[in-house]
Image (tube, grey):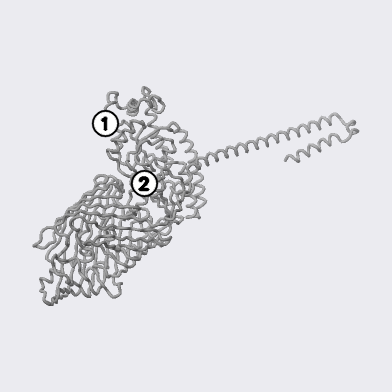
Amino acid sequence: MRKPLFAGAVFAVLAVFPSPSLLAGADSEEIRLLKQQLNSLKQDYEARIQALEKRIEATASTAQQAHSKAREASRQVATVAQAPQQEAGSNSFNPAISLILDGRSTDIDDSELSLPGFQLGGEAGLPEDGFATGHNELVMSANIDDKFYGTLTAAIVNHDGETEVELEEAYIETLGLGHGLTLKAGQFFSGIGYLNSIHDHAHDFADRPLVYEALMGGHLLETGVQARWVAPTDIYLTLGAEILSGSEYPSGDNGSNTEGYSFFAKTGGDIGDSSSWQLGASYYAADFDVREAGGHHHHGEEEGADNELLNGEVELFGVDFVYKWAPMGNPRQRNFKFQAEYFARDEEGDAEFVEGMNSAEARYDGEQSGFYAQAIYQFRPQWRIGARYDYLHADNDISDFVDGGIDLDEFLDESGLGDQGNPERYSIMLDYSPSHFSRIRLQYGRLDDGRDDSDHNDMLMLQYLMSLGSHGAHTF
Amino acid sequence: MKINRISKAIFRCVLLVSIMAASGVAHSALRIFACEPEWAALAEEIGGDRVKVFTATTPFQDAHHIEARPSLIAKVRRADMLICTGAELEVGWLPLLLRQSGNDAIQIGQPGYFLAAEVVDRLEVPERLDRSEGDIHAAGNPHVHLDPRRLLLIAQAFTERLTLVDPDNADWYRARTEDFGRRWQQAIHRWQAGSSQLQGESVVVYHTAFSYLLDWLGIKAVADLEPKPGLPPTTAHLAKVLATVKSSQPRAILVASFQDDKAAAWLADRSGLPVIRLPFTVGGDPAAKDLFGLFEITLSLLQGLQSSSRMHPAVPVGLSDSPRAVASPIRPVNSAQLHLRPQKTTGDLVSPFSSGRSGV
């Protein structure tokens, strides 16, 4: 813009002073006119320059302001921006390890569990009398990569003076397969029921409900694969199916080690901010060649008795319900939990009892069922009280009895298949948890096995449960 | 067998219902699962009506202590993205929700998995990790949202992530973030200017919930009602706090919307300190409708304390201004009671102090 203006001005000067001769003969009026034109040109030129200068100044000051604002912002932000401090030690990728310590002091009338009508197995039993350590569990878990999660739980237990390592769970699980699908493989607690897949240390009582002891040998711990699918709905709905070895109690040894399967469904939701619930249904079935009945032993009896169920099949059906309440959904101060589960087992097979040279055989078809209901109330931080009721019922059909030196009454008693009563148990507990990681529990239980001739079996237990290390989250 | 028939019938019904439910699902806006209300508010600021936000917790719940409830699994199952605090705040429930959900979009390492505390510098990173120190977080204090400067950084990082998850609406998100950032910067200037007189004050806190707010405002926490992070207050510990209150003369006891006020009331009763219940997060107070409202009500609650003390010119204004307050350890506590509890008459002034002693 400046250049044409300047050229114009030069041209004007040249035009004004063409030659002295012309100047001499020029009219004064013409000179005045030229001067006027020159002046107006000059004024116009100066005005434009001033305007330009103003604009440049304004731009510069805006830039200055913007710059100082940016500096201010970056200064503020710099003080809070992340300074990445990644620890690159060799243990960064170690799995999360946690250890559960469980110790008890128990005063119990009879530590042998015997329930009429139930051929016990698996881990079914009652706490030991006196001092004992329970299931001290070592848990390791981690995401294996972006596709798999893996975990192992080993229980280190003391059985009759011998230290044993029991493999509880060892499984892998897919991470984010998508579409709500998750696959699990390995040894795991089956997804049936509510408490079944929850480790003992996370239970609210020191011992498992009778219905779990009697029908599942404590837990249905199986090897196989599980598929779960969460429905894309507002209300929670998950469906699961498992193919299992079918060789664990309540089933037994079978030829292919793939004779078990199960289905389960869970649904649940919230009621306002304060309450939530979950309802589940499950089904399990398996076939077996031989099931060794354990659990049932009388003191002072000779060893070598065989109590077996041959060529059998077993089915289990259950419903479970959990309701939790906390004021405004904040369980810190007070909370309440109610849970109840019902299971029914239908099983049949050829029962055989052999003791030395004597034996007995019969065709057995039994239906057993039971439930428990419990309520836990945290009445102030760290303190909870709870009560539980257990009930069992057996309806066994024995036919085609063959006496091989053992009569029917003795057979029914020794095999555990005689169903003369309904066992029930009342339990209450009080526990104190100084932190998330420690719990001390006092529990009293009164078990009535239902036999006419037996007394109540009273139990008083003081238990500690401590969790060391990076303990993972617990399910609902 | 009888059981077999019943169970088969039940499973058939359940399957039918679930197929019907699944087919009825319509899906347009981006579904965001926010672990806490502050992140839900941020997601709404940035996403506008192109996102549908679900909040897992309310302002009256403690995000440390949430259960992986069935309803939450159902929400995570359908989320396209999640925004949570991280720094181990949700360690008791979020990993379980992720594993139960079977949703690939929001797993760790995916663009849809966003942890706010991980994009900013954190305070109180413990030098020693030992559970005898209480329920501490190895990654530092997770309650980062109460520093508006950090919140702005989080907003920017979240937006970048949002544009990866939903590139079709990237321009929309960026424009909204720019607008939010501009308004937020202005608000920070306004808040800082309006709260400069709070600098150098001290308070008693309940848990480390307000560390970032206090750090931003230059307020000092002289005592914590919790003996160790995450552990409930004990009488023995409160007695120590009371002694600290007497020697360092804080202005108030701060509690969050989700916290129980028994311990704070105990201390207030014996020390004469006022209890200020801060919203902590969006929705924690009726005025904290969004993030702007959260900071405005928080600052006005903190300033209400200042102005209430100025209403009584007969007593010394602001203990930190008075050199005599430092010289004499007893008098300032009484005078603090005087002007912080204006409803009390002078005759009552000695009793809370002495009853505090006998009550311990």
Distance of label 1 from label 2 (alpha carbons): 31 Å
Local packing at callout 1 (Cα closer than 10 Å; few below 14, some 14-19, many 20+) is some
A333 in relation to A404, above or below:
above
Q: Amino acid at mark 1?
A: Arg
Pick the residue in front: B279 or A113: A113
- Quadrant of the drawing holding the C terminus of chain A: bottom left
Marked residue chain, label 2: B
Image coordinates for residue A425, horizontal then vertical, percent: 16, 57
- Type of amino acid at the residue the image marks with label 2: Ile
**Where does the image place residue A275, in percent across and percent down from the top left?**
28, 50
The reply, left or right, for residue A368 in relation to residue A21 is: left
Q: Chain of mark 1?
A: B
Q: Which residue is mark 2?
A: B136
On the image, which quarter does residue A176 sit in?
bottom left
Taking depth in this image into account, of B131 and A54 the one nearest to the observer is B131
In this rendering, the answer to whether B224 lies above or below B130 is above
Q: Quadrant of residue A181?
A: bottom left
What residue does disc 1 label? B357
Q: Is residue B190 positioned above or below A316 on the image?
A: above
Q: Is residue B254 visible?
A: no
Q: Is residue A231 above or below residue A346?
A: above
- Residue found 28% across the figure and 70% down from its top: A246
Q: Which is nearer the N-term, disc 1 or disc 2?
A: 2
Which of these two is toward me, A367 or B141?
B141
- Residue B289 at x, y percent in the picture: 40, 42
- How many tags in the picture? 2
Q: Residue furthest front?
A: A161
**Residue A171 in sight:** yes
